[in-house]
Image (cartoon, grey):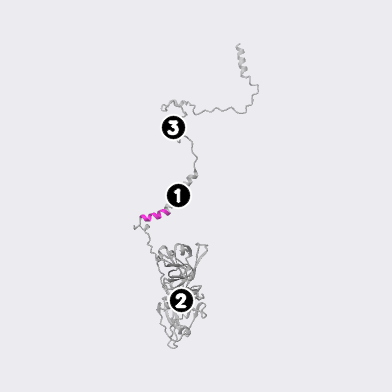
Amino acid sequence: MKKNNQKQEKKGLFAGLGKKRPIIDEPAPKKVRHIESPVKLPFLNDVDEIPGDNEYGRAEDMQGEWGLPPSEATLKQKRKRHFLAFGIAAASFVLIMAGVFYILPRILPGFFAGTNIELFVQPEVNLEYEDDSYRVVIESSVSMMTEPDPSSTRITEVLYNEPVMVTGQSENGYVLITTMDGIEGYVPEKSLTANMESVEPDLHEYKLVVSDPSKNIMTHASNGTLMMRVEMNTVLYADLKREGVYQVSLPNGESGWIGSSGVIELGTREEIQEVSSRYFVSSILTFINAKYMENGLTMYGVSVNGAVYVCSEINGIDMPRTMEEQAQMGMEVELNYDAVTGEVIIEDILPGDILFLSSPSAEPGDDTIYEMAVCTDTGTLFMISPARTTVRLKTFTAGDDICDRIITIRRIFTSE
């Protein structure tokens, strides 16, 4: 019986070896050991300090046992919001920059007003043109007429950015003005603006006087477009200086750029220092062969008295505009005559001297000034052409009729 039982057991162990096993579509599920199932580690049995039953890996209630809030009792992490962090950083940077460059410069001077701290001392501003009657010329040059009519006599010209005072009502599109040197006449009302910021000295850093026959004002420091062509003796005020250029303030609140060559830089309340006669003569010579225009001041139409006015101004002499007033300026030159021939010694007439002449048809003793000339070299005069169409150079000798027409000679500039 015992042997039979053993055979039965063996037979039971190998009974299924010869049979085909059924195909199982899904693998048997693996057993997962949960963390709740405690694991006994022998090497921890002798650690008495561990509270409880010394079961390593036992799940704990972090809220109940440790008193942690739900946000700290879990290992789940929130997704970082990178765009929000970047936006906060950018906003902080903008606020800091605004505080440093915009807010602080406007707040700090108020705290330090009245102190002697140089950084916060506010420059004194004295406005010269607060009166409502002041205007500024907005054209390159404007003819000033004796009447509100373009066909009337031209008195002089006013230049771009020149301050004037309105002294009469508008009439026929013209308005009566007075220049800062006291000349009164009519100009087109549309050629003026009431915005005076471009000529207030204390609002700017530099004063510039154009010494070239003309200069261009551009929209940009380089490769800009033309905004305005300004003439000799135009005065501009600049706020910024770079290598080779200035940013200048223009009427009506605009700004432009002008090259540094051919301009004289001064302090905003500084005047040009007087130079010698050769610089004056050099400036006069730039007008050779320019079109003649009665009392004109520019290369587009100039008179001898107009050329003398602008060339004197840019070389340090305050000169009136009219021929009659110019005849009273400077020192009178005494003429000397040759003892043998009785003719004028023309070597006594030096470069830079201004000659005032009577009319070629004037009677002897008539001292009415008809025209004027500037000596540019011994025996050479800058004057109106006989046809009165241009200004040019004319040579003369001691026996010419010009010497007989001399009323007076004025020496404005000293020679070297």
**Which residue position is annotated with label 3?**
63
Q: Nearer the viewer, residue 393 or 121?
A: 121
- Which residue, given by chain and number where applicable, does mark 2 sit on? 305
Instruction: Please give the range of residues in magenta.
Output: 102-111
Between discs 1 and 3, the one toward the N terminus: 3
Judging from the image, what secondary structure is the residue with disc 2 in? helix
Residue 281, visible in the rendered structure = no
Look at label 2 and name its amino acid.
Asn
Kindly report the distance in space between the C-alpha atoms of the residues bearing marks 2 and 3.
103 Å
Relative depth, front residue between 84 and 392: 84
Please report the residue visible at 50 percent of the width from the left and 80 percent of the height from the top.
394
For the residue carrying disc 2, how many other residues have a C-alpha within 10 Å: few (<14), some (14-19), or many (20+)?
A: many
Question: Which type of secondary structure does the marked residue at label 3 adopt?
Answer: helix
Q: What is the C-alpha distance between the residues marked 1 and 2?
A: 62 Å
Category of crowding for the residue at label 1, using alpha-carbon neighbours closer than 10 angstroms: few (below 14), some (14–19), many (at least 20): few
- Residue 87 visible: yes
Q: Which mark is residue 93?
A: 1
Residue 105 shown in magenta: yes
Identified at 44% across, 50% down, the residue is 95
Q: Are marks 1 and 2 in contact (CB under 8 Å)?
A: no
The answer to whether 181 is drawn above or below residue 29 in the figure is below
Q: Amino acid at mark 3?
A: Gln
Q: Is residue 306 magenta?
A: no
Q: Regarding mark 1 in the picture, which secondary structure is present there?
A: helix
Is 371 in front, or is 332?
Answer: 371
Q: Residues within 10 Å of mark 3 (few under 14, many from 20)?
A: few
Of callouts 2 and 3, which one flags the residue occurring earlier in the amino acid sequence? Answer: 3
- Residue 118 figure quarter: bottom left
Across and down, in percent, residue 7 comes to 62, 15
Please provide percent x and percent y for residue 219. 50, 62
Where 6 falls versus 178 (above or below)? above
Q: Which residue sits furthest top?
A: 1
